[in-house]
Image (cartoon, helix red, strand yellow):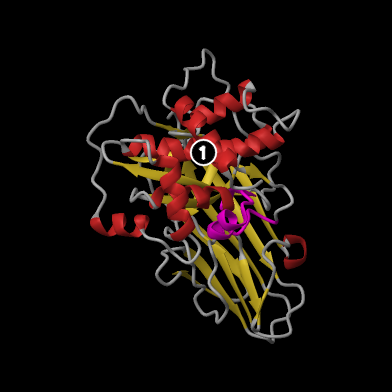
Amino acid sequence: MHLNRRHFLITGAALAGAMALPELAAAQFAPRPGAWRRFQITTRLEITTASDKVQGWIPLPAVNEAAWFRSGENSWTTNGKAAVTTGRGSGAKMLQVEWAHTNDAPVVEVVSIVETRDRAIDLSKPDEASRLSDAARRRYTSGSKFIPIDGIVARTSEKIASSAKSDLNKVRAIYEWMVANTARDDKVRGCGIGDIASMLKSGNLTGKCADLNALFVGLVRAQGIPARDIYGIRVAASKFGYKSLGTASEVITKAQHCRAEVYLTGYGWIACDPADVRKVILEEPPTNLTMDDPKVESVRQALFGSWEGNWLAYNFAHDVVLPGSDGPKLAFLMYPQAECGSTRLDCLDPDNFKYTIKTKELTSA
């Protein structure tokens, strides 16, 4: 897929539709705040061949949002030395574990309790939402190594949103452009890497959630509007019947997913997930759906302002430094990490890296 004049022509049509999306008579996908759900997440990491000092880092839920997510207690067992810590400058919370090279069977198991529920906002009824602090506004409008907001990102953002007059309409224009012009690529490993400048320069606007939602966040920030990715993992099936938007079993080792939020004055933080719209298009049975398929129309409307609470939020962190590691920064932290000596193991190869993540729903909160 290439970034060319045709894509910007699509933008105009998408924006026109965005300003007047019809209400669906019986939406198939319609998250609404309701009862809280409580989950137990168990992450087990084992290093089967250790010939040197070993370190491990397990992401811990660290998001607390009164309307839709609560991070609870974490407990763990290990034959190493463990402590809760945060990535320097990123705020990503994790359990850091160290094993001496004499220990030939490093293992750690972490149990986390979280509570989650659906979220939604009525964009026709702005109110006096809590004010975003100056520090938070600077953080979520700034560029970073992995999400720049200058150069081609700024130029693309301006082309998309130039005719929109309000921040709400600018964000909606970018969301609709993302849905119309990007595509999910299942051949990408994990959730992607989120190198948005390279995506735009190459014209290859394909990837997975960490690519597509990072691009959305960068384009919104380039308008001076606060935006952030939230990194997490799906923990349950979709109650709306969407196979592509939930888990199929208690094993969720490969169910990581990042979402996005945008802060709008008068509304507060609002949920957005253009990457999941593209996931539905590609993966929802019978697969390769058209844009006008009712299943696609339903999620396209809903995922601007709402999302389903079958998902755990770890953190909002970019450019993550792993404490005690001399290795490179991570673009984000939503997978267990480990190093043997100075060698960082492949977190996208859980069968050989040897980690599993399981979910269990407890009683309602």
Q: Residue 38 or 297: which is nearer the viewer?
A: 297
Q: Which residue is mark 1?
A: 177
Whether residue 337 can be seen here? yes
Can you give x and y, in whole percent of width and height, for residue 123 in the image?
35, 28
Q: Which residues fall within the magenta stretch?
A: 189-210
Q: Quadrant of residue 349?
A: bottom right
Q: Inspect the image, locate mark 1, and give the three-letter code of the amino acid beneath it.
A: Trp
Q: Residue 113 or 25: which is nearer the viewer?
A: 25
User: What residue is at 55 percent from the left and 67 percent from the top?
Assistant: 330
Counting labels gives: 1
Residue 106 colored magenta? no
Can you give x and y, in whole percent of width and height, for residue 295 in the image?
62, 24
User: What residue is at 44 percent from the left and 52 percent from the top?
Assistant: 155
Look at the picture and state if 227 lies above or below 74: above
Q: Residue furthest front?
A: 5
| 277 relative position to 142: left or right | right
The image quadrant where one finds the C terminus is: top left
Can you give x and y, in whole percent of width and height, for residue 188 in the image?
70, 54
User: What residue is at 74 percent from the left and 84 percent from the top?
Assistant: 51
Q: Secondary structure at mark 1?
A: helix
Q: Residue 232 or 34: which is nearer the viewer?
A: 232
